[in-house]
Image (cartoon, grey):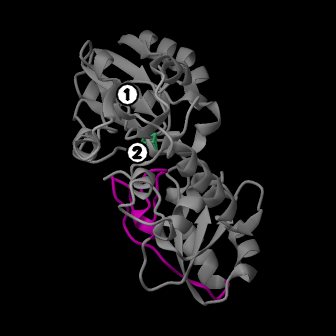
């Protein structure tokens, strides 16, 4: 669906009269324009104005008040409520930009992964690589991801046994780092908007995580952070791990906020909510926030040499 008129048509086809709209942070400025357009089309509209970072965080409170929820910016996770309409955002670029990454590869067959915004260009990317003498292999992702698509909490599409090198096409440094840690393969990250390609090096990241685990060793109590968001619930895992740790307390939270962690006052936390919180937001937190895998390293259950990235099922 590309235009708002098409969205209005789809809503009419579904006999929907009242709707809630939900936007990721980067799209919230569009809320006013889209809401006013749909109001003029005759719909009763509510905008969910809470923070939203993924399809794992559907506005279920708002959905209870309306006939349908339109969730912008993300592809569905798993098997979503049929009352939710997903409006992912596609970001175009010239697939010819991939030619600039070809000289980084040592093999003639590689794996290829990208994010939801660019996944519509995957066939064109495969063709450009083939024209440059590189065979690209893709595989389906997990958590509802399509062929070749990864999320910041799901790297299954990168687990391609037949390749030793992987090309990640997308922006940011976290996703290619995740691919590297999830697969152990050589990863080249290409930013398709700037054309910059570089090999991923995880050393600095691992050094920081090691230091954090060491800092958490002196903690005499651990807050196990469990999210109440629709697609981030890992309560069973938290309960299972807490059963072996008498000084762990499960904390149910909607937004994992540094101020709340400060108020709670635990000397260390383990994050069972969105895995990216522990990685990206650590500088904002008042105490070490480990992943479940890092907590297992701390307790001696596993070893740092087999460090794995945190993923959701
Ligand atoms: Fe994105 Fe985190 Fe949600 Fe996964 S859990 S979809 S990384 S916001």
Label 1: state its secondary structure: strand
Q: Quadrant of residue 44?
A: top left
- Along the line of sight, which residue is nearer the eye, 119 or 110? 110
Indicate the position of residue 278 as horizontal and vertical percent values: 51, 42
Number of numbered tags placed on the structure image: 2
Magenta range is 132-158
Instruction: Give the residue number, with chain letter if any, for mark 2.
Output: 75
Cα separation, mark 1 vs mark 2, equals 12 Å
- Along the line of sight, which residue is nearer the eye, 145 or 303? 303
The image quadrant where one finds ligand 1 is top left
Please give the name of the residue rendered at 59% of the width and 28% of the height, measured from the top-left corner.
286
Label 2: state its secondary structure: loop
Query: How would you classify the magenta stretch by its main secondary structure?
Result: loop
Q: Is residue 312 above or below residue 3?
A: below
- Along the line of sight, which residue is nearer the eye, 51 or 273? 273
Q: Is residue 70 above or below residue 301?
A: above
Q: Earlier in the sequence, mark 1 or mark 2?
A: 1
Indicate the position of residue 294 as horizontal and vertical percent values: 45, 53
Please give the name of the residue rendered at 58% of the width and 56% of the height, measured from the top-left corner.
210
Indicate the position of residue 161 as horizontal and vertical percent values: 41, 82
Please give the name of the residue rendered at 45% of the width and 65% of the height, measured from the top-left corner.
148
Contact flag, marks 1 and 2 (Cβ < 8 Å): no
Q: Which mark is residue 306?
A: none
Instruction: Give the residue number, with chain letter if any, for mark 1.
Output: 70
Is the N terminus in the top left, top right, bottom left or bottom right quadrant? top left
Q: Is-magenta flag for residue 2?
A: no
Please give the name of the residue rendered at 41% of the width and 50% of the height, measured from the top-left corner.
295
Left or right, 126 with respect to 172, comes to left
Are there few (<14), some (14-19), or many (20+) residues within 10 Å of tag 1?
Answer: many
């Amino acid at each position: 669906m590309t235009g708002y008129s098409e969205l209005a048509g789809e809503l009419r086809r579904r006999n929907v009269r009242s709707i809630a709209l939900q936007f990721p942070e980067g799209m919230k400025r569009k809320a006013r324009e889209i809401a006013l357009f749909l109001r003029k089309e005759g719909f009763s509209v509510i905008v969910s104005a809470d923070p939203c970072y993924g399809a794992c965080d559907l506005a279920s409170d708002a959905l209870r008040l309306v006939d349908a929820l339109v969730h912008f910016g993300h592809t569905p996770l798993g098997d979503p409520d049929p009352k939710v309409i997903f409006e992912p955002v596609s970001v175009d670029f010239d697939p010819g930009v991939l030619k600039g990454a070809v000289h980084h590869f040592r093999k003639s067959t590689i794996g290829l992964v990208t994010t939801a915004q660019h996944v519509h260009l995957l066939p064109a990317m495969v063709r450009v690589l083939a024209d440059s003498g590189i065979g690209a292999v893709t595989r389906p992702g997990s958590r509802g991801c399509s062929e070749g698509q990864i999320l910041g909490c799901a790297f299954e599409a990168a687990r391609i046994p037949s390749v030793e090198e992987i090309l990640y096409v997308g922006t940011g440094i976290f996703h290619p780092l995740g691919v590297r840690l999830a697969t152990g393969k050589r990863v080249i990250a290409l930013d398709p908007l700037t054309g910059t390609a570089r090999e991923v090096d995880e050393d600095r990241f691992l050094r920081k995580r090691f230091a954090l685990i060491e800092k958490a060793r002196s903690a005499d109590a651990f807050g196990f952070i469990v999210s109440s968001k629709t697609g981030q619930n890992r309560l069973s895992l938290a309960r299972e791990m807490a059963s072996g740790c008498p000084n762990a307390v499960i904390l149910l939270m909607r937004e994992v906020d540094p101020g709340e962690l400060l108020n709670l006052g635990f000397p260390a936390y383990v994050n069972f909510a969105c895995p990216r919180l522990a990685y990206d937001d650590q500088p904002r937190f008042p105490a070490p926030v480990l992943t479940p895998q890092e907590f297992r390293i701390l307790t001696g259950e596993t070893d740092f040499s087999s460090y794995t990235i945190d993923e959701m099922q």
